[in-house]
Image (cartoon, rainbow, N blue to C red):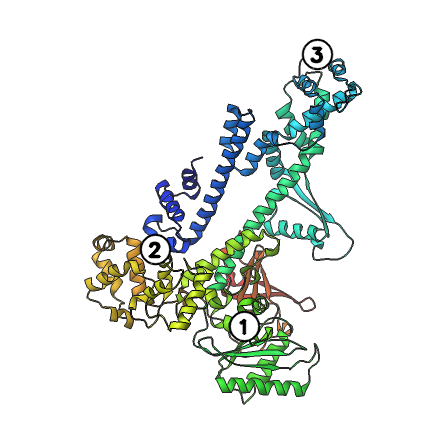
């Protein structure tokens, strides 16, 4: 296989472009570095495309390695023919390769192998000649194989014929062409059928008597069915009309429909199909469906995670983090504008679920008001876990509405997903050794409002709670893909070298966990970094690592103005010459006085300017963008968090009400929207638009602030159905 040519065809890009990109990958360059600083080489491929290309490159290399390995094994056996070589060279998937290899694998003991050991292969071959007439007849010829030899006993002709049929059945089941044809048939006309495994209610009741064609089956249904089966609520099967499967085999096996051997061959085909082929095809089809569904869910999860990490930070605000609870109290943590913990406290407004004590509420209110006044708190960030509803009511109605509360204080509900994971982690223990788990959680709840990216990188990505069925996926693949998303987001935003935690630094291109800890240690021992070049004094960071990481690290207020931009040190000379060419200085960069830079550059001619400065046009455009807005944060363009001063109950909701909400999760069949009533509403894909929508992500992303209309409310089940169709009609 020509891997580079295959990649070029699949990604619809030039072969030279693929070759240059693969060379960069093989040299050890990271995806963020290649995407951002090698655009001339890759043709400006973005990080998502580069990761897809990298994944496919790995698959194809593994495929080619396995193809060569299989070819070598078969050749060593003396069985490699031009036909097998042709089949191996034309296989497109690992499954097809393994099908070709199947007849040559070391065999476990089977009915077919036992029959071969008894010397019945010639009889099987005699039957499969499918002659117009047999002389001797098959039954008579079978008598020649009767044997009393120990270990090779064949008592009579019937036993010989049964053994020969076992050999034929096994050969049919090992035929790569037949297996491929049956797989394709099952995927085309087969169905998934599910039945209840136990007579009791569950979340899987929709699948207690369910059947759907495989070609129409959505990925989220596949994952739900698999989980229901795993939890012993469902019995699942692939259904395929047996006659269709038999006909497919007959077309490949039967060469003479007039042969007297046909009835025996047909009986053997049915045995091969029922006993060997269909069970294997069923497993392969379900495995393929799971892999496709998991990859689809993974892409949705990755996109949700990307959008969550890039939610606009609430900058310049002092936040009171509030971790709700009942018996163990509600933990509070005040965090200043830089994320530093100023104060902590514990209040007990709800001694137990469902019981409010007026004295407890008043004492709790006094503590919260004291913290708000003392530290000039701007926003209360409430976790959405246990007792969240009661806590929201307490803050909104008792604290914010109290005449003693400073004006302008607001609150918001923040997802607690992963907060408990972080709080109990080694990282949290190192960061706050004197805090208990809930106090750490309160700090995390405050900080994830101030800077979602910096806080959420401390949590295992799959625990952040913006996916579907993530615990059912292949965990290694999940961790790899989500880790790549976090890496892209961290590098896309940029990291302050003097304030970033080692967990954040460890996601920076070219910096591993050890190097990240060394950076923090160097910072603690030597004070703040004043230039990017100082990184070379940090253990485990050499020239190669510096090349990969430097452009993504920022040094605000440092000695070198360009160190606070996304301009890579290797391009500093180009940037400075660019400024000089149009009579600007580095002081103009610092002061933000370059609004005319792009205008002047474009008037001069970007292509001409790039040639004269000795760089590519994409690099020049990026340099201009960075000089125009030094230290810019790409997240500032995202919608700001929705802050509240009053509370809305689910009982206040009525069909037809129009509200603003924040998209919290996007899944295959819709998205969940926080409209401020504790329970997120479901905006089903069918209610998103009057036009056909293939996937909700076409319209909405996690973090989007959107207008919705209440369609239906079920107070008992806490279900809220939303729609946007009327809104679309108004437009």
At which x and y percent is residue 574?
Answer: 25, 59
Residue sitting at x 55%, y 34%: 97
Label 1 sits on a secondary structure element that is helix
Is residue 376 visible in the rendered structure shown here? yes
The total number of labels drawn is 3
Residue sitting at x 77%, y 52%: 198
Cα separation, mark 2 vs mark 3, equals 75 Å
Asked if 267 appears above or below 359 in the picture, the reply is: above
Comes first in the chain, label 1 or label 3: 3
- Which residue in the structure is indicated by mark 1? 445
Count residues near mark 3 (Cα–Cα under 10 Å), then give few for <14, some for 14-19, many for 20+.
some
Cα separation, mark 1 vs mark 3, equals 83 Å
At which x and y percent is residue 182?
Answer: 62, 34
Label 2 sits on a secondary structure element that is helix
Cα separation, mark 2 vs mark 1, equals 35 Å
Question: Are discs 2 and 1 less than 8 Å apart at CB?
Answer: no
Residue sitting at x 51%, y 59%: 304
Count residues near mark 1 (Cα–Cα under 10 Å), then give few for <14, some for 14-19, many for 20+.
many
Q: Is residue 447 left or right of residue 227?
A: left
At which x and y percent is residue 63?
Answer: 50, 39
- Which residue in the structure is indicated by mark 2? 37
Label 3 sits on a secondary structure element that is loop
Asked if 161 appears above or below 6 in the picture, the reply is: above
Q: Which mark is residue 134?
A: 3
Count residues near mark 2 (Cα–Cα under 10 Å), then give few for <14, some for 14-19, many for 20+.
many
Comes first in the chain, label 2 or label 3: 2
């Amino acid at each position: 296989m020509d891997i580079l040519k295959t990649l070029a065809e699949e990604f619809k890009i030039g072969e030279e472009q693929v070759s240059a990109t693969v060379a960069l990958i093989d040299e050890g360059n990271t995806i963020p570095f290649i995407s951002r600083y090698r655009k001339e080489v890759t043709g400006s491929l973005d990080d998502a495309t580069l990761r897809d290309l990298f994944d496919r490159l790995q698959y194809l290399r593994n495929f080619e390695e396995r193809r060569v390995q299989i070819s070598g094994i078969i050749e060593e056996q003396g069985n490699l023919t031009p036909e097998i070589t042709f089949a191996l060279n034309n296989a497109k998937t690992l499954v097809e390769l393994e099908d070709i290899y199947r007849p040559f694998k070391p065999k476990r003991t089977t009915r077919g192998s036992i029959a071969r050991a008894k010397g019945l292969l010639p009889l099987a071959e005699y039957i499969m000649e499918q002659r117009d007439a047999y002389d001797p007849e098959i039954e008579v010829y079978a008598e020649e194989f009767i044997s009393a030899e120990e270990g090779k006993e064949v008592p009579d002709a019937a036993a010989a014929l049964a053994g020969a049929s076992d050999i034929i059945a096994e050969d049919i089941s090992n035929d790569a062409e037949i297996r491929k044809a049956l797989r394709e048939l099952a995927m085309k006309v087969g169905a998934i059928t599910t039945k209840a495994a136990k007579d009791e209610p569950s979340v899987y009741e929709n699948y207690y008597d369910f059947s759907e064609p495989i070609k129409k089956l959505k990925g989220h249904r596949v994952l739900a069915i698999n989980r229901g089966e795993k939890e012993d609520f469902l019995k699942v099967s692939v259904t395929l009309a047996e006659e269709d499967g038999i006909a497919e085999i007959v077309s490949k096996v039967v060469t003479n429909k007039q042969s007297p051997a046909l009835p025996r061959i047909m009986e053997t085909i049915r045995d091969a199909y029922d006993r060997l082929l269909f069970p294997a095809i069923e497993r392969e089809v379900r495995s393929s469906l799971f892999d496709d569904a998991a990859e689809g869910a993974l892409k949705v999860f990755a996109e949700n995670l990307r959008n969550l990490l890039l939610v606009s930070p609430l900058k310049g605000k002092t936040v009171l983090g509030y971790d709700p609870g009942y018996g163990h109290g509600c933990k509070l943590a005040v965090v200043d504008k830089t994320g530093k913990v100023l104060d902590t406290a514990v209040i007990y407004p709800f001694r137990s679920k469902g019981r409010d004590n007026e004295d407890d509420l008043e004492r709790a209110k006094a503590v919260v008001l004291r913290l708000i006044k003392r530290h000039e708190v701007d926003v209360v960030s409430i976790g959405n876990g246990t007792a969240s509803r009661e806590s929201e009511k307490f803050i909104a109605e008792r604290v914010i509405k109290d005449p003693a509360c400073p004006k302008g204080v607001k609150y918001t509900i923040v997802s607690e997903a992963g907060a408990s994971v972080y709080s109990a982690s080694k990282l949290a223990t190192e960061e706050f050794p004197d805090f208990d788990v809930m106090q750490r959680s309160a700090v995390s709840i405050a900080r994830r409002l101030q800077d979602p990216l910096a806080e959420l990188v401390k949590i295992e990505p799959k625990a952040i709670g913006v996916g579907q069925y993530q615990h059912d996926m292949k965990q290694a693949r999940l961790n790899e893909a989500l880790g790549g998303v976090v890496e892209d987001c961290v590098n896309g935003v940029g990291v302050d070298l003097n304030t970033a935690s080692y967990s954040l630094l460890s996601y920076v291109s070219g910096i591993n966990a050890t190097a990240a800890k060394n950076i923090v240690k160097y910072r603690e021992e030597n004070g703040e970094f004043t230039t990017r070049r100082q990184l070379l004094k940090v253990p485990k960071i050499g020239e190669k690592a510096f090349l990969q990481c430097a452009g993504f690290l920022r040094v605000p207020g440092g000695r070198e103005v360009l160190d606070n931009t996304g301009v890579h040190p290797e391009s500093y000379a180009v940037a400075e010459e660019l400024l000089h060419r149009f009579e600007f200085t580095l002081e103009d960069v610092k002061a933000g006085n370059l609004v005319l830079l792009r205008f002047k550059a474009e008037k001069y001619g970007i292509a001409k300017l790039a040639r004269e400065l000795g760089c590519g046009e994409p690099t020049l455009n990026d340099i201009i963008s960075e000089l125009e807005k030094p230290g810019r944060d790409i997240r500032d363009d995202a919608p700001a968090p929705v802050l509240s001063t009053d509370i809305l109950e689910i009982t206040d909701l009525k069909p037809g009400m129009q509200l603003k909400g924040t998209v919290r999760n996007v899944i295959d069949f819709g998205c969940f929207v926080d409209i401020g009533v504790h329970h997120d509403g479901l905006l089903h894909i069918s209610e998103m638009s009057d036009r056909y929508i293939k996937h909700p992500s076409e319209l909405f992303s996690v973090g989007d602030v959107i207008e919705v209309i209440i369609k239906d409310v079920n107070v008992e089940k806490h279900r809220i159905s939303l729609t946007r169709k009327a809104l679309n009609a108004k437009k």
